[in-house]
Amino acid sequence: MKVDSEENESLLRILVCDDDPADRKLVRTYLRRIDGREIIMLEAGQASEIRNILGKYKIDVVFMDIQMPEKSGMQWLEEIVAGELAPVVMLTGSGDEEIAVKSIQEGAVGYLPKSKLSPDKLKETLDSALMKWRSVQQGKANQEELERLVDHDSLTGLYNRRAILRLLDEQISFSKRYREIFSISILDIDRFKKVNDSYGHLIGDEVLKKIADLLQRQIRDTDFTGRYGGEEFILVLPRTELASALVISERVRKSIESCGMQNADGNVFHITVSQGVSVYKSDEKSDSLIKRADEALYRAKDNGRNRIETSD
């Protein structure tokens, strides 16, 4: 378990990886001369020490010597970058431009020859490394948020129709390859138009959000759920035969039926859902699988609602 950084934002935990104690001492001396920051310096000269520190602490910057025993500095750079553990500044005994370029290409945020070490140069490199790292992390956060918005329904937070159908196609491909069974369930809110007409669309939206929350609570970690249409939802249940799919669907049905919804005046009302379940057939396409579940759903509606029907 990694130890979180202290609340003081000016505090930095810096790991200096160098098998030469004299070089580590020089870096430590220069770091102590940097004003305006509280710095905790951790030192490592061996692979086991590096692994122990990276596994135990949240490191803000790594200064990594190119030439390290057991495992080269470039190999450490590759591992740290792949794990997104911390920004890495490469240190070298020479000012080789080719090594500098390769380091940056491999993901280092800075490069510093030991011959140019000074308090000012170290501070400049440190500040630049932190700035670049924050910029990269913010860019990734923005990209993740964009991807989330593209794939998720803005009202319920579930996968939207496009995303859940893509996941369904991926599940079909997986099942074809490994010959594994799976099921889907299409769920529709009973008399949802009456909810909107009686209580207004804002309450209708709250109902949709509540059902989405209940679905996420009732399904397993391996399952997927998405908003398929206006008041329709779809569950994708990997490695699930009919009997287990019915157990999950019934659990969902009961949780929704027993959940009290509230109108604008705070009065409680209840809703129900109907579901159609279908089990994947060998070499079946998604549109056929969905059609069979949809037909079962409409049988559930015709047979009185608040029930589950299965396809043939």
Image (spheres, rainbow, N blue to C red):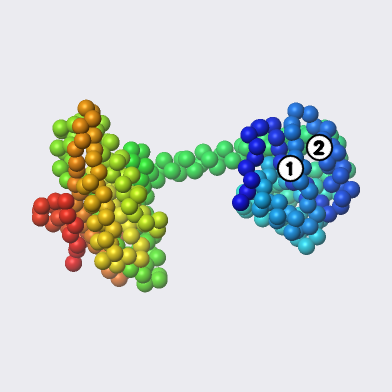
* 197 to the left or right of 238: left
Vertical position of residue 108 compared to residue 121: above or below: below
Secondary structure of the residue carrying tag 1 is strand
Residue occupying the point 75% across, 55% down: 49
Vertical position of residue 136 compared to residue 105: above or below: above
* 229 to the left or right of 18: left
Residue 201 appears anywhere in the view: no
Residue occupying the point 17% across, 59% down: 309
Residue occupying the point 73% across, 49% down: 103
Q: Which residue is mark 2?
A: 31
Secondary structure of the residue carrying tag 2 is helix
The front one of 291 and 310 is 310
Q: Which residue is mark 1?
A: 14
Vertical position of residue 306 compared to residue 138: above or below: below
Looking at the image, tell me whether mark 2 or mark 1 is earlier in sequence order.
Answer: 1
Residue occupying the point 35% across, 49% down: 216
Vertical position of residue 178 compared to residue 11: above or below: below
The front one of 37 and 276 is 37
Residue 210 position in % (x across, y down): 29, 41
Q: Quadrant of residue 266?
A: top left
The front one of 281 and 50 is 50
Mark 1 belongs to which amino acid? Ile
Residue 302 position in % (x across, y down): 10, 53
Mark 2 belongs to which amino acid? Leu
* 54 to the left or right of 115: left
Residue 132 position in % (x across, y down): 66, 38
Residue 40 appears anywhere in the view: yes
